[in-house]
């Protein structure tokens, strides 16, 4: 009996930098870079490493340091930049600690490790200074678009609604249909196109299912919804 197996990958192309090697924005990959062990471990790392300087304490400096860095394919952090500073002392300390961070798990795009530009906010709070110093990582102000409920729900939607075309079965057609579309600020999908097709029948079926998709959670840039270009590969496999 032939069954339909679905594989999905998505990358949102909000901002891609032209460099010697392509660098994807934080919101642009199907799997975001992650500190080893998860974000809770990153809290612990920051809390154990960041030191409040005497000058910052004297000046009662509190607030957020906005930083960005590249997570390389091997997980190393490079090109650490302070995009919006708080003070000379706190900025330097945030940069120092990020530069000495253990290697991260790299971002993934279309199944391969990629260089990713990642943005964070590090919060300096005098209440947490001293022997038990803390630095809090705020929720990211950037986010790539997402099917409501995440990938698990998307798999379920595709499995329920995507039909293997009869002609494609007869011809033994298998492979991937690459689509692109815009996720609007309100989550609606527009300008749905086949970037690289497989067959007329599979291409039309992929377009149909995406066209009738529920509204997505839109991408965020600086905390605000933005229209985002998104790419998706849907895999048609006969078994």
Image: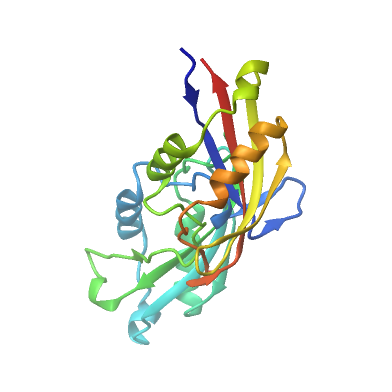
Say which residue appears at 42% left-offset and 75% top-offset: 64
Residue 33 relative to residue 167: left or right? left
Say which residue appears at 65% left-offset and 39% top-offset: 204
Q: Nearer the viewer, residue 95 or 27?
A: 27
Q: Nearer the viewer, residue 187 or 92?
A: 187
Residue 104 relative to residue 204: left or right? left
Q: Nearer the viewer, residue 209 or 15?
A: 209
Q: Is residue 226 above or below residue 58?
A: above
Q: Position of residue 109 (x, y in %)?
A: 59, 41
Q: Is residue 135 above or below residue 149?
A: below
Q: Position of residue 170 (x, y in %)?
A: 64, 16
Q: Residue furthest top?
A: 1
Q: Residue furthest front?
A: 166
Q: Nearer the viewer, residue 38 or 99?
A: 38
Q: Position of residue 198 (x, y in %)?
A: 70, 30
How many numbered marks, from 0 up?
0
> Can residue 170 be seen from the camera position used here?
yes
Q: How is the image coloured?
A: rainbow
> Can residue 71 be seen from the camera position used here?
no
Q: Position of residue 17 (x, y in %)?
A: 71, 56
Say which residue appears at 68% left-offset and 17% top-offset: 171
Quadrant of the image occupied by residue 159: top left
Say which residue appears at 49% left-offset and 48% top-offset: 32
């Amino acid at each position: 009996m032939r069954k339909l197996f679905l594989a999905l990958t998505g990358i949102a192309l909000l901002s891609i930098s032209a460099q010697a090697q392509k660098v994807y924005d934080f919101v642009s990959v199907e799997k975001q870079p992650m500190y080893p062990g998860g974000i809770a471990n990153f809290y612990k790392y920051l809390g154990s490493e960041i030191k409040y300087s005497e000058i910052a304490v004297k000046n009662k400096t509190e607030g957020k340091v906005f930083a960005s860095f590249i997570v390389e394919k091997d997980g190393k952090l490079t090109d650490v930049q302070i995009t919006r500073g708080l003070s000379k002392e706190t900025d330097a300390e945030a940069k120092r600690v990020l530069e000495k961070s253990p290697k991260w798990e790299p971002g993934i795009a279309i199944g391969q490790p990629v260089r990713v530009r990642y943005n964070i906010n590090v919060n300096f709070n005098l209440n947490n200074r001293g022997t038990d110093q803390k630095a809090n990582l705020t929720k990211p102000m950037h986010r790539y678009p997402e099917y409501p409920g995440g990938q698990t729900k998307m798999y379920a939607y595709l499995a329920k609604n995507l039909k293997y075309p009869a002609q494609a079965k007869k011809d033994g057609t298998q492979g991937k249909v690459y689509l692109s579309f815009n996720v609007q600020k309100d989550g609606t999908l527009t300008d749905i196109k086949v970037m690289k097709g497989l067959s007329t029948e599979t291409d039309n079926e992929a377009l149909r299912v995406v066209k009738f998709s529920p509204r997505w959670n839109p991408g965020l840039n600086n905390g605000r919804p933005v229209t985002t270009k998104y790419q998706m590969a849907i895999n048609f496999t006969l078994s």
